[in-house]
Amino acid sequence: MIIAGWILALFGLAQVVYAGTLDVSQLVEGNRLLGIAPSVVADADLVAQRAMIHQSGCATFLAGAIFLAAAYLKPAPPGAQSKAWVSMGAIAAGSLAFAAAAGFGFFLWGLHDRNADQRLVQEIRERNARAESTKQLEAEVDRRLRNEAEAAEAAGGAPP
C-alpha cells in the first residue's frame, strides 16, 4: 500500500504540473474581405482538457495521500478494531482511486464526444465562410469587369 500510495501521489502531482504547462491559446485567422482582424483567444476545448487533467491529478494525488495515510497510521492496540480501521482506510482509498480512474475515463469519453460535435460545427462554419467569401470575391470581380467595360465604352473603344 505504501508503494501504491507514493506512485499515486507522484502521478497526481505530475498531472497537476502537466496541466499547468498546457498552452490553451489559439490563433484565429482574420478575414480581410469581411474586415475581421486576426486574434489570439483561448480554445474552449483545450481549456476543458486542461481542467479535466488538473481535476484528475488532484483526485489521484488525494487517493495516493489516503493510501499513504492508511499505510502509515499506527493502528490502535491489536484487536478487531485496529484491523477494521486499516481495512476501512484501504477500502476508502481504493474506492477513491477507482472513482478517480472512472471520472478520468468519463471525462475523456465526454471530451471525445464533445470534440466530434465541435468538429462538425467547425466544418459547417468553415464551409459557410468559404461560400460567403467566394460570393464576395465574385461580386468584386463582376464590379471590376463592369467598371472596365464602362470605362472602355466611355473611351470610345471596344471592350477587350
Image (spheres, helix red, strand yellow):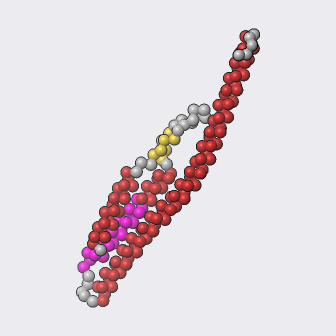
Q: In the rendered image, which quarter is residue 153 located in?
A: top right
In front: 101, or 21? 101
Q: Main secondary structure of the magenta part?
A: helix
Counting from the top left corner in percent of width and height, residue 27 is at: 48, 41
- Which residue shows up at 74% across the image and 11% down it? 157
Q: Is residue 35 above or below residue 17?
A: above
In reply to whether residue 145 is colored magenta, the answer given is no
Q: Is residue 69 visible?
A: no
Q: Quadrant of the C terminus?
A: top right
Q: Is residue 72 visible?
A: yes
Pick whichever, 116 or 143, lies toward us.
Answer: 116
Residue occupying image coordinates x 34% and y 77%? 90
Residue range in magenta is 54-74
Q: Residue at x 69, y 30 (%)?
A: 139
Residue 83 in which image quadrant: bottom left
Percent from the top left, x then y, of residue 119?
56, 51
